[in-house]
Image (cartoon, rainbow, N blue to C red):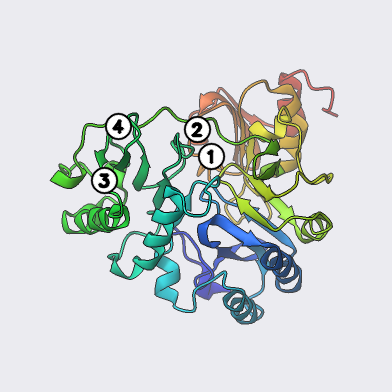
Amino acid sequence: MTGFAIRGWCPDAWRPMVAGDGLLVRVKPRLGRLTRAQLAALGEAAAAYGNGLIDLTSRANLQLRGVSEAGWPALLERLIALDLVDADPEAEKRRTLLVAPEWLPGDDTHRIATDMLARLGDLPALPGKMGFVIDAGPAPLLADAPGDFRIERGRAGEVLLRADGRARGAPVEHGREAEALVALAQWFVASGGVAVGRMRRHAEALPAFAAGDRVPAAAAPSMRPGGHPLGGVVGLAFGQIDAGAIARLLDHPFSAVRVTPWRSLLVEDVLPTDPALIADPASPLLRTDACVGAPACPQGQVETRDLARRLAPWVSGRLHVSGCAKGCARALPSEVTVTGRDRRYDLAFDARADAPALHAGLSADALLSLFGSTDAA
């Protein structure tokens, strides 16, 4: 599988990435929504062509795991037929939109995102990790979500264009929001932004149309498990669901699901119940981040998710268990951070995965004992 062993970019369906358990194939549902039929077919495809596991990403994408190189072409063909992947690889590469999941048909978020999808061909070539955020509801839902070029609601109710890394934005004329996003992306490239890779690291003065002084509206809290006006929200431990849980979800009378950037699903029409779905908003797993770790990830130094499940009940704040110092599951600091190094565990507090350790070289049981866990052997 050496043909896919590339690092430092985001995979998609046309460019899978090698992991320890096979290829990662990313699916970017349009507007973050899968119909019932699409979800059913995606679960079947995950089992037929991969290991049945699907990850949710912080950009509300889905990643099918364990796909073989031999099975990838047939999977790609199936995903295109489901309208989950573009038949044009360049169009698929440019479709990096994160859409606030509470949109309603015809509202500003839906309208702007639909306009943006129609204008993808106008975008310049951007670094692979860059993306757009469409968040034009009454209050921003995606203030902490990753994205370089943002549309969001201002404090006075206006719609703003905001460059990531700038605290304030510029008002945009109704109907010209997608045009403004494309123009900002074009300016980013023309002004040398590609050299630094991300909007927040680009120090050039913004063009006049994007250099505003309007304050974004106060952010709304992220969606939590439980009932919702559109149906119900269910969390997924570590942002992962398997084909079996999808099959059981199909026993419920829903019309579609929406993928959120908070490792949860918004299920339209109903609040489903299943052991694999977290319905308790107080579950410690909802404030626990853990990558797949070893052996599924080649960079992983340690097992992560079993330890995270055992440790989570003993941690009152945010817990991050990372298989290595890259910290792929969480870029921000956490109250408790556990990092794999030399096949042992390092522990730090209020830190990122790459921070110096307060306690280094621990075994899993020694780490658990530090927190008073009776789960240590």
Marks 2 and 3 sit apart, C-alpha to C-alpha, by: 36 Å
Task: Identify the residue under disc 3.
Answer: 172
In the displayed structure image, the side of residue 310 where residue 12 appears, left or right: left
In the displayed structure image, the side of residue 289 where residue 186 appears, left or right: left
Task: Identify the residue under disc 4.
Answer: 167
Task: Identify the residue under disc 2.
Answer: 352
Query: What crowding class fits label 1: few (fewer than 14 Cα within 10 Å), some (14-19), or many (20 or more)?
Result: many
Say what secondary structure mark 2 lies in: loop
Dot 3 and dot 4 residues touching (CB under 8 Å) = no
Query: What crowding class fits label 3: few (fewer than 14 Cα within 10 Å), some (14-19), or many (20 or more)?
Result: many
Q: Earlier in the sequence, mark 3 or mark 4?
A: 4
Say what secondary structure mark 3 lies in: loop
Task: Assign the N terminus to one quadrant of the image.
Answer: bottom right
- Say above or below: 119 vs 358: below
Say what secondary structure mark 4 lies in: loop
User: Which of the two marks, 2 or 3, is nearer to us in this view?
Assistant: 3
Dot 1 and dot 4 residues touching (CB under 8 Å) = no
Between 151 and 277, the residue placed more toward the observer is: 151
Disc sitting over residue 330 in the figure = 1
